[in-house]
Amino acid sequence: MPEVHEVIFYGKSGDGIHLMVDRLVQDLIRRGFYVMAYPEYDPERRETMARVHVRVSKEPIYERGPVTRPEVAVFMDFRLLKHAKEALGAGKIIVNAPSKDLLNNYLGDNDIKPELYVIDLHGLRRKGIDYTPHITELVTKALGL
């Protein structure tokens, strides 16, 4: 059975989550990986929670369905952590937040201590910097690819 890495992205419709995942997928395909990605929306599409399920492998991927054991969870907004408790079991979490201190205060004391990667996407956007390569780099680093 091939080793399949699972990643789940959380965002709100309009956050640019699909563009970012598309660029990640294209980058991984260029590197020789097999990738499967598909979005999942809440019933109302405008400004609702969007999830994008991603699987990556060196061999063809035959598993279908939602990502249930993500190695990496990516949050486009730290406030979405409240709505995605199942992703807190991921070993590594990438979060859009202004600072790691704010994120630690937001998470509070809990038994779950994933490895956190914090990136300030809003700060990059304000400076006119394309944030998608930064997320792609963080995800591939977190997966060890």
Image (tube, rainbow, N blue to C red):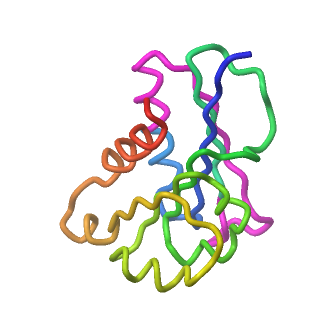
Vertical order, 120 against 55 (above or below): below
- The percent position of residue 7, horizontal first and vertical second, equals 60, 44
The magenta stretch spans residue 90: no
- Residue occupying the point 20% across, 62% down: 128
Task: Write the start and end of the magenta stretch as one range.
Answer: 24-50
User: Depth check: 60 or 101 in front?
Assistant: 101
For the C terminus, which image quadrant? Answer: top left
Seen at 68% across and 17% down, the residue is: 2
Q: Is residue 44 magenta?
A: yes
Residue that sits furthest to the front in the current view: 111
Residue 71: where, in percent of width, then height?
60, 45
Instruction: Decide: is 12 above or below 18.
Output: below
| Residue 12 appears left or right of 140 | right
Residue at horizontal 45%, vertical 29%?
26
Number of marks in picture = 0
| Residue at the spot 27% in from the left edge and 53% down from the top edge | 130
Q: Residue furthest left?
A: 127
